[in-house]
Structures are given as structure tokens and as C-alpha cells.
Image (cartoon, grey):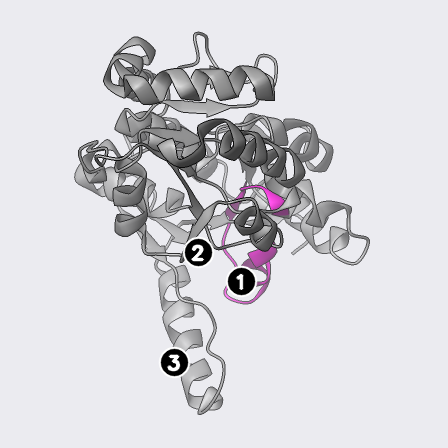
Amino acid sequence: MKGHRQPRVLHLYDAADVGATIVRYGRRTGLPWRQFNVAPPEGGAKVIRSAVWQARRASGILSADLLHLHSGSRIGIVRSKPYKPFVLHFHGTDIRTQYYDPLRRPTLQWGADNAAAVLYSTPDLEPHARTARADAVYLPNPVAMDELPAWDPRSRPLVVFASRWESSKGGSRQLELARKLAAALGPFAELQGIDWGSESAAAAALGVELVPRMPKDSYLAWLASAHCVIGQSAGILAMSELQAVALGVPVAMPKLGNGYYPEPVPVLQGEDEELVEQVRHVLHDPVAASAQLSGPQWIRHHHAPEQAVNTLVSLYDRLYQERGGPADRGR
């Protein structure tokens, strides 16, 4: 922007690497953005380690004009001195579940009330985020295409369940779909999922091979080895589904929320029986299915990191010019 410098922004913590992606793409264009993603220390020598952590935290905050806090569960870091204006970014469980816990709600509401702006990361969060803050803004999760491996499905057909096995991801519905897929596909295809979530044992009992949780690059390589990815049953495209779509892997999942995403959304949707048939069809020619869905192109158009950066440049600049306004309420 002409006439003034870009504000120095410190991203605090992260969720699904959204903060890291935003900072990385912002810095590529010369923006003075940084990230602090170090949890407070625990265990032995805690006094010394805590002092070092506090010093690093305070140094980062003092050198910033504006803070961008990822997840309402981390609000304590912006309530401690030194104070700076902050953006509060809701990512899921924090506003969908924790906000309705009477013990946690006051803290989350304080964050929403005192934030210079409030963002939310998936469209299903809108009613919750706007209950906390009426002017909350949707910022679609950015997908870093440059860190994705090439799609390289293995020789034997592989169906991957991308999400953890729990109620927030539509766990019971996902288990029922796993049961039907196992029965329909038999030994023709492998079913795999992450060994993560309260219902993972139930998935294993249905014939889903559980793989351990893994670093991000290994997780992306695992998705890229699949012929088809099954998305969560909660009606949204979370980061795992977006990454699978970006890879070009055909994604099948229960119906998305009405109006959540720009049409045509490049995923196969339907009731369980429809999904079983769609998956069966995909496994016989995944390359053709991928070409027809054209997922990577849709991701570039709607979830490119550059779009998130541009949105935030405008937001940060406006907030920087308004310093002394909403972010200072209740200090």
C-alpha cells in the first residue's frame, strides 16, 4: 500500500499448517510476516525452559504490529503482557464444540470480543463464529500445491479414509460406509485409515487397515498412493480432503453442506449405496475419474495460498490503520 509500510504480523501457533502456509507465501512477496509455533515447555527443568520460552514469545510479540492467533484454545498467549492487537482465527473444534462448554465459553468469548477481527476456516463454522462475533469472516483454507507429491497410485487398488475416526468427523456414518465398502469390494481392494480417533478400533474391526499417524510429507505421500480417498462425513472439505483433491485423487464422500462451496465441487457425493458404486467405478479407471473431476484446477481457483495472502494483506492494513480500536477493548 502507498504511503505507509506493511504491518509486521506474527502468527501464533498453527492448525493444519494454515499459518505456516500463509507466512511462507507472504514472505515470498516480501511481506514482514513471521510465525511463533512453540508450545510452553513441560517436564523437567521447567523453570529455566519456561523463562526461555517467555523471552522468545515476548520478543516476537514486541517486534510485531499485529498478532494472528490460530485457534481459540490458545487465547492465553494474547492475554499476557506484552499486549498487541490480534486477529482470532477459529479452525474447528474451538468454536464448534469448546465454545458451547460453559467452562470454556467465557475465555473464547473474551477472545472474540477483544480481537481486532475474527476469521473462520471452513463454511460450517459460520453460524458458530458469528454467534461469537457477528462480523466474523470466512477465510478458505489455503492449499500449498508446491508441496504436494505427484499422484502415483500403487498397483493394487487402495481406498484411503483420510480423516481421524471420531464424531466430529462424522464417525458413525464413516464407520457404516467402511462396512459397506469392505463388503462390496472384498479382496479386490485395500482399505486403509489413520490409527487416530476414539472409533479407530471399530474401523479396524470392520476390515480397515490402520496406519500410524505420520509427518505431513509422509501423509501426503500416503494420500498420493491411493486410487480413491474417502472424505469425512461432516459435510465439509477439511484440509485432508482439500489436499487429496489437489493431488488429483478422486474423492468420494457424503453430501456436502448446501451452498458451502462454489459449484461444481470436484468430489463424488451421495448416500452410502451411491458412494459404494462410485468408488467401485473409480477403482476400475481412477485416471479417467480424476480427469473428469479436475480437482487440482478447482483448488487453484478457490483455495490458492495467494488468495489468502491477498485477503490478509487488505485486512492487516486496515487493522493497522485502526490501531487503538477494537483490539484494545477490555484491556
Q: Quadrant of residue 64?
A: bottom left
Amino acid type of disc 1? Ile
**Above or below for 56 versus 206:** below
Camera-nearest residue between 201 and 126: 201
Camera-nearest residue between 237 and 202: 202
**Above or below for 290 versus 187:** above
* Residue displayed at 62% across by 55% down: 198
Report x, y in % for residue 241: 42, 32
Element class at badge 3: helix
Residue 52 disc label: 3
Quick one: label 3, few (<14), some, or many (20+) residues within 10 Å? some
**Above or below for 282 versus 135:** above
Quick one: label 2, few (<14), some, or many (20+) residues within 10 Å? many
Q: Quadrant of residue 259?
A: top right
Amino acid type of disc 3? Val
Q: Earlier in the sequence, mark 2 or mark 1?
A: 2
**Quadrant of the rendering where the N terminus is positioned:** top left
Q: Which residue is mark 1?
A: 77
Report x, y in % for residue 84: 49, 54
Specify the segment rendered in magenta. Answer: 73-93
C-alpha gap between disc 2 and disc 1: 10 Å
* Residue displayed at 50% across by 35% down: 182
* Residue displayed at 27% across by 51% down: 218
Amino acid type of disc 2? Tyr
